Amino acid sequence: MRLPEGVAGLARLHALIAEHAGGLEPDQVAIGIETDRGPWVHGLVCAGYRVFAINPRQAARFRERYAISGAKSDTGDAHALADMVRTDAHQLREVAGDSDLAEAIKVLVRAHQNLIWDRTRQVQRLRVGLREYFPVALEAFEDLAGADALELLARAAPDPVMAARLNRTQISGALRRARRNHVELKTERVRTALRSEQLSQPRELSAAFAVVTCSLTALIAGLNTQIAAMHKEVASYFERHPAASIYRAQPGLAAVLSARVLAEFGDDPARYADAKARKNYAGTSPITRQSGMKKTVQARFVHNDRLVDALHRQAQGALTGSPGARDYYDRQRARGLGYQPALRQLANRLVGILHGCLRNGTPYDEDTAWPPRRPLNPSRLRGQPPHR
């Protein structure tokens, strides 16, 4: 049956289930759905049903049991989902019972990250435009998203002709308002770069590019304001969570990065059976492919991109913030692993440490997390990570 959105549709579904359930309790009713969020999922969980969020790829493979022709319809998909929860519920994962606060943090951190991604896209568009008609601006401004670059590009120097007229006072004022260090040195560097020779476009074309530059700089400045405001909201919500101190104590995790990890992992204590399950969900643990005499161990390429990004950044920060993490990383490099594989191994280890801290309700301890080992022979090291 096709049901409408909203309260009326959900009420009709409850009535439909009651009509066919034959006196069963709500927790004896299993529901398969191809999402794990939204008002409907929340309503079904609150009603007491067992709700299974099924990945569309799983449903597609299961559908092939009935037909290999590739035919697809909503009715067929509903039949496949119903059979999955009827016969294979023990192989599926129920929707996690995360707290309302954890769900709220997820909404905020994802919106915050989306704004950052949007800003990156706009900065790239600005960079491409400047390269077309004003290439020396790329040499003058290292950070196109910085307040000083945006101010000078939008108000004083949207095109090469106006840029050449900027004086030291205007440039240094913009740098000071952006709270830059070494203002005098940077002022001279920017002024010299803006007055250097460059290939130019015709006047009309340059003026058109200047209009686009002003528009993009205004958009990026607005995104900067909203990102800063969202940053404060994320930190505020995160600090209210009971596990905030445990996450924040982990090496390489600051407030916003901790909030991202918490949001993507969730806070349902029964969601992960052990550390291995959490590592598998994180996408940091390798997968084994074995067939006959062939066996390979590979990195996971199907994973939660937001969570993997946060854990990768945590591992990078832990290299300088934790002696034990740095030693573990050096040992992986000594085994012959490259920078990224060694960093992924470190992230995998950090996920296991986090799981233990959350399970026991204890903060991170350097000596407990990294027991003493035999000293590493420096001559075995095959390289260091690139400068960040």
Image (cartoon, grey):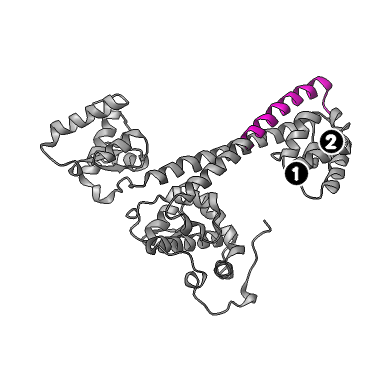
Instruction: Single out the residue that lies furthest toward the left.
Output: 22
Q: Residues within 10 Å of mark 2 (few under 14, many from 20)?
A: few
Mark 1 or 2, nearer chain start: 1
Which quadrant does the C terminus fall into? bottom right
Q: Is residue 214 visible?
A: yes
In the displayed structure, 185 sits above or below 206; it is: below
Whether residue 296 sits left or right of residue 16 in the image: it is right
- At mark 1, the secondary structure is loop
Stretch of the chain drawn in magenta: 200-224
Q: Quadrant of residue 31?
A: top left
Residue under numbered circle 1? 142
- Report how far apart the C-alphas of labels 1 and 2 lie in the structure: 18 Å
Residue at label 2?
A: 170
Is 42 displayed left or right of 86 in the figure? right
Q: Is residue 93 magenta?
A: no
Residue 143 position within the rendered picture, expressed as x and y whole percent measured from the top left: 72, 42
x 36%, y 38%: residue: 35
Could you say whether the residue bearing mark 2 is in a helix, strand or loop? helix
Amino acid beneath label 2: Gln
Check if residue 209 falls in the magenta segment.
yes
Image x and y of residue 158, in percent: 78, 29
Report the magenta stretch's main SS.
Answer: helix
At x 37%, y 35%, the residue is 38
Q: Is residue 334 above or below residue 312?
A: below
Q: Is residue 289 above or below residue 110?
A: below
